[in-house]
Image (cartoon, rainbow, N blue to C red):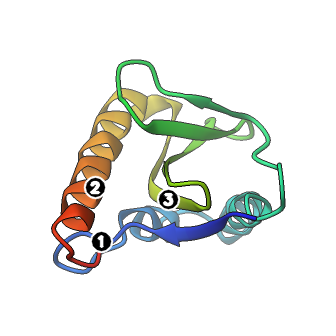
Amino acid sequence: MKRVVYYLTANGVEPFTKWLHKLDRPVQARLLRRINRIERPGYLGGHKPLKGIAGISELRDFSGPGYRIYYGVDGDYIVVILAGGDKSDYRSMARKAGEYWQDYLTRKRSGEHA
């Protein structure tokens, strides 16, 4: 069984949650249900690894503007939600998620709670 955690920047901001709160409540609820399903054994649904950004994958929601949830997998059991966006900001958010992932790994190696 997987456990979902949300990435925190060094100054305590959750980028995904910050983005999510800008969306309408029904969209927020749908995306959170999507994330909650990750914790079910064997259930990631529509997802794919990002090309050119090691360790990052995206959960895809094809409604509206094509929402994306960027995440990394830490070991066998932890899914780290890094950022969110839609198809219009795909490149910049994917790159940002890659930066967040590298920060998470660096802080984890140094023993800092990431």
Which residue position holds label 2? 105
Label 3 – label 1 distance at C-alpha: 12 Å
Cα gap from disc 2 to disc 3, whole angstroms: 13 Å
Q: Quadrant for the N terminus, please.
A: bottom right
Alpha carbon distance from label 2 to label 1: 8 Å
Among numbered discs 3 and 1, the one appearing first in the sequence: 3
Which residue type does callout 3 highlight? Ile
Question: Marks 3 and 1: which is nearer the front?
Answer: 1
**Residue 85 appears at what percent x and percent y?**
47, 45
Dot 1: few (<14), some (14–19), or many (≥20) neighbours within 10 Å? some
The residue shown at (76%, 61%) is: 30
* Residue receiving disc 3: 81
Which image quadrant is residue 34 in?
A: bottom right
Amino acid at dot 1: Ala
Write down the residue under mark 1: 114
Q: Residue at x 21, y 74 (%)?
A: 111
Identify the residue at horizontal 74%, vertical 40% (top origin): 63
Q: Nearer the viewer, residue 80 or 84?
A: 80
Across and down, in percent, residue 17 comes to 46, 70
Of pointers 2 and 3, the one earlier in the residue sequence:
3
Asked whether, in this view, residue 85 is left or right of residue 76, the answer is: left
Q: In the orientation shown, which residue stands out farthest toward the top?
A: 51
| Circle 3 residues within 10 Å: few <14, some 14–19, many ≥20 | many
Please give left or right for residue 87 compared with residue 8 in the image: right
Q: Is residue 99 left or right of residue 39?
A: left
> SS of the residue at dot 2?
helix
Q: Residue at 36% across / 40% down in the picture?
A: 93
| Cβ–Cβ under 8 Å for marks 2 and 1 | yes
